[in-house]
Amino acid sequence: MSRISLKVTGAQGQGVNSVGEICGKGLKRAGYCVFGYREYMSLIKGGHSSYQLDASHEKIESSETRCDIVVNFNHHGLEQNYADVKDGGILIHQTPEWKFPKEHQKLLDNRNVTVVYLPTEDILKKLKFPPILGNVLITSVVWSLLGQNDEGLKELVREQFGHKGEELVKKNFMCVDEGIAFAKDCAAAAVVLPDADPSWKDHLFMTGSEAMGLGIVHAGCRMYVGYPMTPSSPLLSYLAEIQNDTGMVIKQAEDEITAAQMMTGGMLMGTRAATGTSGGGFDLMTETVSLNGIIENPAVFVLAQRPGPATGLPTWTGQGDLLLAVNSAHGDFARLVMSVSEAQDAFDLMPEAFNYADVFQTPVIVLTDKHIAEALYTQAPFDEKKATIDRGNLVTDPKKLAKLKAHDRFDSSAKDGISPRWLPGSKAEPYCAQGDEHDGAGNVDEGAENAVQQMEKRMRKMDALKTALPEPQLLRVAGCELREGIDTLIVSWGSNKGVILDAIEGMEGVAYLHYSYLWPLKTELLEELAAKAKKMILIEQNYQGQLGMLIKQECGLEFDQKILKYDGRPFFFDELQASLTA
Amino acid sequence: MKIPLDSKGVSMHDYYTETQCSWCDGCGDYGVWTATKRALAELGIAPHNVLLCYDVGCNGNGADKINAYTVHGLHGRVISLAAGAKLANPELPVMAFGGDGASFSEGVGHFVHAFRSNYPITFVLHNNANYGLTTGQSSSLTWQDQAMNTAPNGMPEHTLNSMDFVFSLEPTFVARGFSGNIDQMTEIFKAAIQHRGFAFVDILQACPTYNKFATHDYLLEKCHDISGDGHDTSDFAAARALAVDTSERIATGILYQREDLPDFYERLVPRQGKKTTAVDEVEIQSVKGLCKDFI
C-alpha cells in the first residue's frame, strides 16, 4: 500500500490542531483517504501534543510510527520527535539557530532527513501580522511540500475565517502565498503522493465521537445525559453542539450517577436516551446498570475506555474495561456488551444498541476508546436506509393496552423472558418498576418460588440474546479461500480493527475475526475457524488479554500468540506488521 | 370538605391496591400515602397519568401500595431518576419520594442540583430524622447526642440545619407538613404538583419504632399551620426565618413560592415551541444536514 504521513507537534494551544485539521480536510478533498491521530496530555495549555495525518489513495485507518514530514512548533518537538522522520523525510521547525545534539544530527544524517527552518516570526514581522497568522503560514508550507495547489487551501481558509470578515481572509491568503513561495525555495523536495482517487472527495472527515453522535441521533435517541470525562467528553460536546438542530434534550449532570439515573428515567418514560462516560465514571454508574437489569428497562451506556487503574492515562487509549463491562454491577442479569471499532460502525451500531436494549428490555453497554473517540476517519456518506427502529414488545395500541393486566409486565412465563412493556401515561393497568424482587406486576415478593421464576425469566433473555446476536465478522482473508486452509487467524475487537486490516493487507493466509458483540459471547464460528487455523493470534490493548480470557472461559480455546499493548498508544501499522511477521 | 373516596371522576379508590401496607403501626408513611392519593384524586389525575418515583427506605416500600405507574429505584437517587423521566415526557406529573437519609447523605448532590436545575417535579421528603428501614441509625437530621443504632453513645455529629440549607439553594417552592395532618398535606401536595419548577415538600413524620425524640405527640404539639397568619409566601427572608426557627413552634404550610422563573424544561432551547415530547419523537432521524460540516 502506498501511503504518506505527516505529523505536527507543539504545545497544546499553539495551533497544532488547526494545522492538522486544515491539512486533513484538504487532503481528503484532494482525493485521499486520510486518517488523523492526536496525542496530547491531560492539561489545557503547554503540554506537548501532536497531530498526525496518514493519507493514501486506498482506504487506510491507521497511523505509521514514522512520518514523511514532521513539523515542530517549538524546540520540544525537535528534542522529542526528531526520530519520527522517515528516511529521506522532511523536518520543519521554527526555532531560530537550533542545533541538534551530535547523536540526533547523526541519526538525521543517516536517514537523509532534510531539516527546514521556517522563519515564521520574520515573515510575519515583514507582513506586520500578529503571531496567530503563523498557523496558516505553516499550513501553507506543509501543503506545498505535499505537492498540493493553493486553491484547495484558500477555499478551506475562507471557510474557516470568512465569517470574521474579508480583511482577515485577505491576510490569511497572503500567508498562504508566502508559505508557497517559501516551500518553493527551500531545500526540501515535495513528498510524492500516490495519484488521487476522486471518490474520496465526497467522504466525511470526522472523529469517531462525531460519528457515534450522529448514530445516536439517527437511532431516534432524544435525550443524552453525561458528565465530562475524557474520552467520552467529545461525544457529549458534539451532541450539545448540535442540539438546536436535533432538538434533543441534552443535560450535563452533576455526576455520573445522575447521568445514568436520568437516562434510566428517560428510558422508563419511553423515549430513547443514552449516557456516556469513561471507566471511572462507569464504576459509579454500575449500581444503576443493575437497577435496569431488575426493572427490565432498556438502557444504553457508552463506555469510552482509557488506560486505568484510577485516573491512569487520561488522554490515552486502551481496552482494559472489557471485563468491567461484562462483570460490572451486582447480581445476575442479562446484558449486552458490544464495541464499535471506527466511524462507520460508531454510526451503524448505535441504532442496533438501542434496538437490542428495547427488544430485550435490559442494559446495553457500548464500548469505544480514546483512539476511536478522537481519531479522524475518512468516512463514506452514511447510508440512511440501513437502520430500522425495533422497539420490541412495546405495547402502544389502545385496544391491546386495554387488555393488559398489571401482572403481564413482568410475567415470568413470557417467551424468551421478554414480557410486554408499556409506558407511564398509557391507558392501561399501571405497574411498579420494582427494584426489589417482585411478582409480575412489580409488587414486592420475597417468596422462594417467585425469586426463582423471576431470575429464570430475566436470564432467559440472555439465552435469547445470544441466539439473536450475529457471529463475529470474518473480515478479510488474503490469499486463501474463506474458512479453508487459514494459516493464521487473528482475533480482536474495537479500534484494533482498522490497523489490523491495514497491517494484514497483502499477507498470505491471514484471516481476521472481528468481535463487535462481546457479551454474551458467540464462539461457534470462532471454534470452527480455530479448528482450521494453524496459528491463533489474539490482539488486544490491555495487559491480561481480556477477550482471550472470555474466550477461554466460554469455549476453552487458547491462543498461540498474544500481541498485547498497554502503553496508552494505539497499534501503529508498521509496528503491528512487524509483530505479525516476527 | 369532600374526600373523593368514590366519585364520578377520579377517586381515591382508583389508587387502591390489594397489596398490604407493611409499615409499623403509627408510621407517618400512612399519612403521606393517604394524602398523596387524595391530592392526585382531587386534581383529577388518573392513576395511569402520573409517575410516582420512590427512593429506598420505608417510604419506598410504598411503591407497590398505590395503583399508579411507579418506580422503586436505588437509595439516594430518586430525584435524578424522576427528573430524567420528567424531561422525557413533561406532560405527565412526576412526584419523587425519599427519606432524610437518601436526601441529606447518600443523594445530597442530586438534592442540591435539583434546586439549581429547577426541574418541574415534586419532591416529598419523608423526614423522620433517622434511617428506619435499616433499624434506626442516625441520619444527618437526627438530633445530636441522640443514642441511635450505630451511635450508642449519642450521635457525635451536629444536626444539619436542613431548612437553612434548602433556602441557601434558592428554591422556588418550599412547604412543610406533618404526617398527622392529612388535610394540610393534601393541599400542599396539590400546590406542589401544580408548581412551575422544583417543589420541595418537607414532611415531618413520626417513626414510632426508632425516633424517640420527635414523636407524633411532639410534632402534634409543635406544628403550627401558618395559613391563617397572613404570611407572604413570596417573601424569601420571612419564609426562611419562619422555616429555620423551630425553637418555639414549627411552621407548616406553604412557606415560600415563586413562579416567575422558568423551569428546567422551559429553559431548554431545543425544546422550545415543540408540541411533541421526547417520547413521541423516537423515530429514525436523518443526519444528512449535519454531515455537511464534515465534507
Image (cartoon, rainbow, N blue to C red):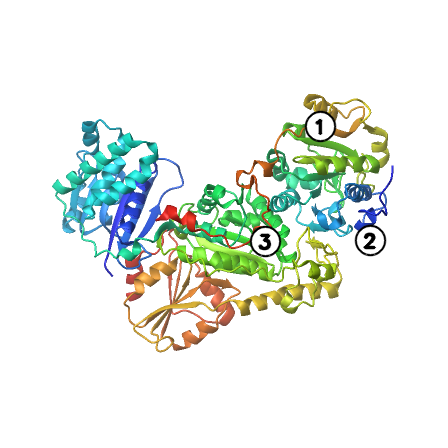
Q: Secondary structure at mark 3?
A: helix
Relative placement, left or right, of A336 versus A168 is right
N-terminal of the pair, mark 1 or mark 2, is 2
Foreground residue, A95 or B280? Answer: B280
Relative placement, left or right, of A405 versus B293 is right
- Vertically, is A108 above or below B129? below
- Mark 3 crowd level (few <14, some 14–19, many ≥20, 10 Å Cα): many
Mark 2 sits on what residue? B20
Residue A498, visible in the rendered structure: yes
Q: Position of residue A360 (x, y in %)?
A: 59, 62
Relative placement, left or right, of A276 versus A371 is right
Mark 3 sits on what residue? A289
Q: Secondary structure at mark 2?
A: loop
- Vertically, is A266 above or below A545? above
Say what amino acid the circle numbered 1 marks: Tyr
Q: CA distance from mark 3 to mark 2?
A: 30 Å
> Tag on residue B256?
1
Instruction: Please name the residue shown 51% across and 55% down the image.
Output: B284
Do marks 1 and 2 share a chain?
yes
